[in-house]
Amino acid sequence: MRKILAVLILLGSHLDAQSIYSTGGSGGGTPTYPLAAPAADNCATPPYSFTSDTDTGICSSIAGTVDIRNDGVSGFKFASGGRASSTIAPNADGTSVLTFTNTIPTSGTGHMESISITSTGSAWGNTSTVAGLRSTLLAGYTGNRSTFGILGDNSVGGGSATILITGFGGTGPATGVVGVADDSGSSLGRVGVYGLAAASGSNSARSYGVVGNATSSTGSNEKVGVYGSAINIGAGTENGVIASLGAIGTIASAALLVDNIAEASPIAIFRDAGTDKFTIADGGLVTAAEFIQSQAGDQFLTANATNATTTFSNLTDLTVTVTTGRKYNFEMTLFVDNSTDTDGIKLDFEGGTATATDFRAHTLIHGSAALLLTTQVTALATDISLASLVGVGQVKVSGSFEPSGTGTFIPRFATVTAVSGTLTVFRGSNLIVKDMP
């Protein structure tokens, strides 16, 4: 035994610290001897070891390289400088080349990552990109399944339904991929998630830079394919989503910014079941294949309104809310009749709460056979009055309104005298108000 120990001590004194060849074959399961810097491929003929151990274990094939092999196949290499590489193909059953299994602790602080990759360094130069993680699928696949450069699959429930809008802070829903660019000191900009789809040659298939697809087996939850949010904490512009046909120049704060840049293509097309319904053409021309309703400014009398007194009644169906400082024009059409012609008709525009900096309205009242009244007023409260409404008539008013206070704009109607007649404003009467530039 003393002789054996002496030989081992003598052998160790002539070798620098080296990698270990770990036997995995019939030679036993315990580590054997240190590996000297190889003059040949020690993975093929490990020195100081058993010949049956050449298929499995840890060895050194060239100076400065440690090779982990299994059944004669190199699985993982650590090269000079600490660089690691693997050339093993996935198994046919779909199992991964490299698998890490981690159990999330029940308590703790900070982030919990199963795998963390950290890169650091100074300037790299101007001819290369710098990446913390790169995954490349080389050409050659001939199957018909989807291929992914990186696949993020998250089956862990999140702590909140609120979308994370400030990176990793707070709680949020379960997320497959999160991209965070947090370089507060950079004046060159930051990109959280970037998608590039480049096709070359005669490839005519579609290319998608970024695709968002939200599906669920339950019909009661909300689904969002793509979500964009920009929070302006300090000074500067903010955009939830920018869609452009080229490199965007100056941006303006907006939830959605669309720019066709120098392309002759339309700025935007909105479709229903593949059919164009609303188009903003190059240059800004807007066309619509359907009617466009202004629920704020287009009002319709849904039922007959009656008044048998000289006290004004509001036509409440024709109410429009106006904003101080804005400029409006309006067109009003009333279909009217008084059961007693000589009780007449009068109207004004003081039914709402809005006040006027400037107001003007020109009115035409037609009877069943002739034009009965032409008049123009310049105040909301000025009466437009006709003593005798002969037959079924029509009131047409064209006007402008600049509010001095935000409020409602409502026309009113009444009889001039109240003897025995009832004044009716018929269903279908309408008021159209437009907000002018």
Image: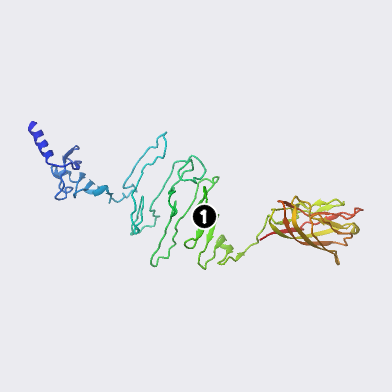
> Dot 1 surroundings within 10 Å: few (below 14), some, or many (20 or more)?
some
Check the picture and name the quadrant holding the C terminus.
bottom right
The residue depicted at 48 percent of the width and 39 percent of the height is: 159
Q: Is residue 96 at all visible to an observer of this figure?
A: yes
Rendered location of residue 133, percent (x, y) = 36, 50
Kind of element beneath mark 1 = strand
Residue at 33% x, 44% y: name it: 99
216 or 370: which is nearer to us?
Answer: 370
x, y percent for residue 301: 76, 55
Give x and y (percent) for residue 83: 27, 49
Q: Which quadrant of the structure image shows residue 371? A: bottom right
Quadrant where the N terminus lies? top left
Q: Mark 1: which amino acid?
A: Val
Q: Quadrant of residue 4?
A: top left
Left or right: where does residue 433 sit relative to residue 234? right
Residue 79 appears in the rendering: no
Residue 169: x percent and y percent?
47, 42
In the rendered structure, the answer to whether residue 271 lies left or right of residue 185 reads right
**In the figure, residue 330 lies in which quadrant?**
bottom right
- Name of the residue lying farthest toward the left: 3
* Nearer the observer, 59 or 54: 59
